[in-house]
Amino acid sequence: MRYPFHSNKSIRLKVAPLLLSFGLAVSMTACEGGGPGDAVWQPETAKQSTIGVPKTTAAPTTQAAPATTAPAPETTVSGETGVSDPSSEAVVPTTEEETTEPYNELDWIDYEVKSKLTEEMYEAATKGLGTDNTFRMANVIKKARAGEPVTIVAFGGVAAAGEGASKAEKSLDYLLRDYWKQTFPDSELTIARDVSSSDDPYYAIHRAALFIGLKPDLVLIDYSNISEKSPAATNSTLYLENLVRRFMEEENQPAVMLFYISTEAQAEDKDPQRTIGVRYRLPMISFYDAIETGLEENVYTDRSSVTTDTNRLTDEGQKIFAAILERYFNNVRASVRSNKTNTSYVLPNSSPEASLYAGSHIADNETVRPSAKAGIAKGSPASPDHPNGWSANAPGFEITFKITCRNLGILYRAVADPAGAEVDVFVDGNYIKTFSCADMSLTAPCDRSVEIFATGVKGTHLVTLRQKAGTAGSFFVLPALLVS
């Protein structure tokens, strides 16, 4: 669902291919002086598929940003976990700061009247803030107070996509931008959402390259509800950490927040998302736990008043979620005004696997040509997000790539149709796995990812995808390669 929002900008990367390059430092080109079918990962050049890249322009500012708003340099610590003791971090004495920011009634808004958000519900939603480091979030607020534009990027499933509102004025994006306009009238807020990677953080790692060029100030992530059927379920902690670290290592030092929209926060050893949140000391907010508390208090009679059976937020749910975020932003804002925020943040020094997918990106027939193919046509129009891939047009299809990279995955189109093909994967002549393009449990076709290999070592491989022998289904759409 897309809305013609007023005032500040909202970007939804979902369907239309928007053509804008941000100079991503990766490409797929000919190698070893070989033929045009050879595909190579080359960090020296700057080209990749532009499908899905957000098209936006720099927002004008009404006043210059003071020098003090630039983020302070970060350092990396050694050690097994690399997480410093929060009590050891320097915090400016809690004296009231002189500020020219005008008094704003939003500081004292009655959230219970506005959205039925009670004190108990907010406490339940923010119980994960115990690991929170306010340094980066404070920088977001400082930019807004200085009248600079702020960009928010969101990853996750349908709930994180902000869908479900009956009209634009009821949506989370509209409510947040309305709050932003009242609180920071000179700061333009842009919201960009990735609704393509759904519950697949592995795919999101590669989608992240499309958002890096926006230089987001705040990244919102919810992969707490990964389906057991998802290929990402087994390695979700690894994928999530790579996604988080990909953004946190960016030069502009964006803040990262984790959400629990349709599931509860679990014990750290059972919850991949909370494991990463604690490790990186990220703010974690649980809409789910807030609603559970509201149900216990009889604020709501049943969950359907705030979420649908497809996990989309209703109008009332959008109001609650917006109120939780607004209150959190106002708390950080109050800390900034009184100099009570952390004055530094130490990025954990994690294992090499935490950056296994560094430089990951999406490649298609704009940048890669197969070494050989049979029964395969160029183009993948069945995949709205990635139409420049390849598609099967006959039984017995086969496609081979000679590719030089460290890690490789693919996207395929899954459909609720028995015509969906069974596909065998071979690397250097060795059978690796089989995946099915048919899933009768689907209510709509979707792109899914499959990881082929992750060696972490640059090498050249022959990768072949072919219809499984003896099977009837021949519908096969290969929208893109997932490369790092």
Image: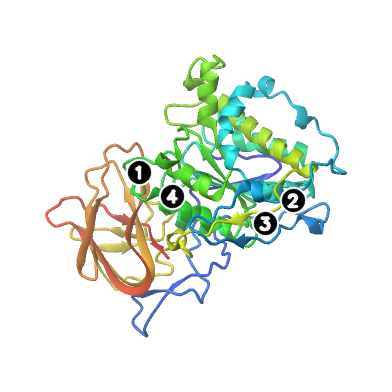
Residue 460, image x and y in percent?
33, 75
Q: Which residue is mark 4?
A: 201
Distance (Cα) linking label 2 and label 3: 18 Å
Spatial separation of the CA atoms under disc 2 and disc 4 = 29 Å
Labels 1 & 4 near each other (Cβ < 8 A): no
| Alpha carbon separation for disc pair 1 and 4 | 19 Å
Instruction: Report the residue at 49% width, 58% height from top.
Output: 350
Pick the residue in front: 10 or 243. 243
| Secondary structure state at the residue bearing disc 3 | loop
Label 3 environment density (alpha carbons within 10 Å; few <14, some 14–19, many ≥20): few
Left or right of 441? Residue 456 is: right
Q: Earlier in the sequence, mark 3 or mark 1?
A: 3
Q: Earlier in the sequence, mark 2 or mark 3?
A: 3
Packing grade of label 2 (10 A; few <14, some 14-19, many >=20) is many
Q: Are marks 3 and 1 in contact (CB under 8 Å)?
A: no
For the residues carrying marks 3 and 4, which lies nearer the camera in this image? 4
Q: Which residue is mark 1?
A: 445
Across and down, in percent, residue 238 comes to 41, 53
Residue kind at label 4, given as amino acid type: Pro
On residue 57, the disc is 3
Q: Is residue 86 left or right of residue 138?
A: left
Q: N-terminal of the two: label 1 or label 4?
A: 4
* First in sequence: mark 3 vs mark 4: 3
Q: Nearer the viewer, mark 1 or mark 2?
A: 2
